[in-house]
Image (tube, rainbow, N blue to C red):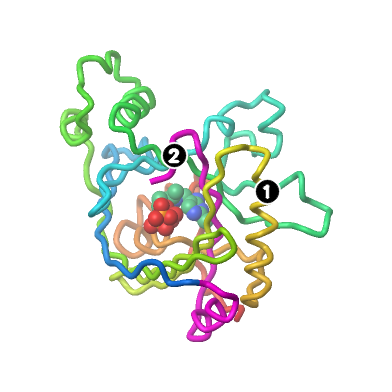
Amino acid sequence: SPPSGSVEVEQKFLFGPGTEEKLVAQGAALVGNVSFRDQYFDTPDWRLTLADHWLRKREGAGWELKCPPPECTGISNPATENQSPRGLPQVPARALRGGTSRIDCATRYQEVTCPHNIVARVCGLLGVESAARLDDDVARTVEELGLEEFATFVTHRRKYHVDGLSVDLDEADFGYAVGEVEAVVTKQEDVPVVLKRIQEVFRQLGFEEKTKIPGKMSVYLKKFRPAHYESLVRAGRLLKVRDIATVQ
Ligand code: V4E
């Protein structure tokens, strides 16, 4: 998992039969071919996900909390100027806007894997008075807080490395395939460079970088948890699933 304090910059895309060949032609190397189950947890009234916090247990990796990086939570901090006031995940790369490089859909998330920090953030968000009462055992915390599993699915992932980036080709067991170009950034000032590199890979693969692609969670919740889905879409936390034309 990425070093703590780092941020994942990700851009999703729909992939077709020609995508892997194009990746290989770009010099991409296949570095992983795995299947894993994810289980996502939330309060019955969805307080974590409505606050853009995604607590999951991933087979082979353990507990992970995907949430906005700290610089996305402030409002008056000039470093967060390119965030929408509520810190919504669709972060325009403002520094790049108007220039030749532009990726409007890249999202940035922090992936917290240290159990102590996961427990602290979840308790803090839910306003549980004393996090000290709970230990660093995420499973026990989940139980004590009454969190419920709201989504579970298996992903088959083929992972490529190209030009310092990771490209994941994911097929979920409920019938949705989505790709993701991703980089882990440890310094905030490196974000524009990474966005530019993502854009180059996108251009070479023939993708339109401005197209917003729903993730697996959008499609899953729409299908299996429509009320939760509607609530997240309304809150601006999830992309609405529409009929999407492949751009390849
Ligand atoms: C962050 C998030 C969710 C959690 C799952 O994240 P995602 O990147 O979609 O899944 P996956 O399996 O590729 O995780 P990885 O292995 O890369 O860590 S579910 C919804 N969100 C928020 C979100 C959003 N609103 N819009 C986009 C484009 N992505 C994520």
Q: Nearer the viewer, residue 186 or 48?
A: 186
Q: Is residue 233 visible?
A: no
Eyeballing the image, is 200 above or below 115? Answer: below
Question: Which residue is pictured at 63% across the width and 60% down the height?
Answer: 198
Give the answer, above or below, for where 133 lies relative to 46: above
**Snapshot quadrant of residue 204:** bottom right
Residue type for callout 2: Pro
Please give the name of the residue rendered at 42% of the width and 41% of the height, measured from the top-left corner.
111
Camera-nearest residue between 230 and 8: 8
Residue count near mark 2 (Cα–Cα under 10 Å), binned few <14, some 14–19, many ≥20: few
Mark 1 vs mark 2, foreground winner is: 2
Q: Residue at x 52, y 35 (%)?
A: 69
Residue under circle 1?
92
* Residue 93 appearing in the image: yes
Q: Is residue 133 magenta?
A: no
Query: Does residue 195 appear left or right of residue 48 in this picture?
Result: right
Taking depth in this image into account, of 148 and 95 the one nearest to the observer is: 95
**Magenta includes 14?**
yes
- Residue identified by numbered label 2: 3
- Residue 171 % position (x, y): 36, 71
Choose the circle earlier in sequence order: 1 or 2. Answer: 2
- Real-space Cα distance between discs 1 and 2? 24 Å
* Picture disc at residue 195: none
Density class for disc 1 (Cα within 10 Å; few <14, some 14-19, many ≥20) is: some
Magenta-tinted stretch: 1-28
